[in-house]
């Protein structure tokens, strides 16, 4: 068992700027799978003094709690969704 303590983290308030679905065609059927991440909580790693830590490249170290949302679509449903997006209504 390791005696190393987990890193210290500080909650980071955040807000969604854009919600994005990614879609994948299934090779074994004409169905489409959509996936969208829902971010629940963001935290920044901090040192013993509470100062934010960075990678060796200078990038901030964040921990993100998220949940995937899945959408299963038939070919007909996919066609309707594409039409709605073209008309400016993504149906979210």
Image (spheres, rainbow, N blue to C red):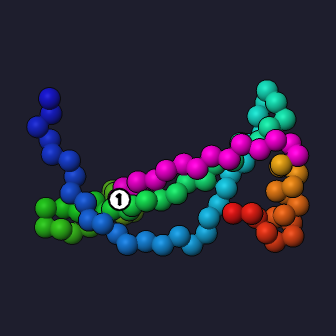
Compared with 17, 40 (above or below) is above
Q: Percent x, y for residue 2?
A: 15, 33
Relative placement, left or right, of 79 versus 44 is: right
- The residue at the point 76 percent across, 64 percent down is 90
Q: Percent x, y for residue 3?
A: 11, 37
- The residue at the point 14 percent across, 41 percent down is 4
Closer to us: 36 or 48: 36
Relative placement, left or right, of 3 versus 32 is: left
The main secondary structure of the magenta stretch is strand
- The residue at the point 82 percent across, 41 percent down is 74
Compared with 41, 76 (above or below) is above
Q: Is residue 3 magenta?
A: no
Quarter of the image with the N terminus in it: top left
Give residue 73's quadrant in the image. top right
**Magenta-tinted stretch:** 61-76
Q: Percent x, y for residue 89?
A: 79, 69
Relative placement, left or right, of 40 versus 3 is: right
Quarter of the image with the C terminus in it: bottom right
Give residue 55's quadrant in the image. bottom left
Label 1's element? loop
What is the count of numbered marks? 1
Q: Percent x, y for residue 5?
A: 15, 45
Residue closest to the far left: 3
Relative placement, left or right, of 78 versus 54 is: right
Q: Residues within 10 Å of mark 1 (few under 14, many from 20)?
A: some
Q: Is residue 65 magenta?
A: yes
- The residue at the point 13 percent across, 67 percent down is 49
Residue at image mark 1: 61
Q: Is residue 34 visible?
A: yes
């Amino acid at each position: 068992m390791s005696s190393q303590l987990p890193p210290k983290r500080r909650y980071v308030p955040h807000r969604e700027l854009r919600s994005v679905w990614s879609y994948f065609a299934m090779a074994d059927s004409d169905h489409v799978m959509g996936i969208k991440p829902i971010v629940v909580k963001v935290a920044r790693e901090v040192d013993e003094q509470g100062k934010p830590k960075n990678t060796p490249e200078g990038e901030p170290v964040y921990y993100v709690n998220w949940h995937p949302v899945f959408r299963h679509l038939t070919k007909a449903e996919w066609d309707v969704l594409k039409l709605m997006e073209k008309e400016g209504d993504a149906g979210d």
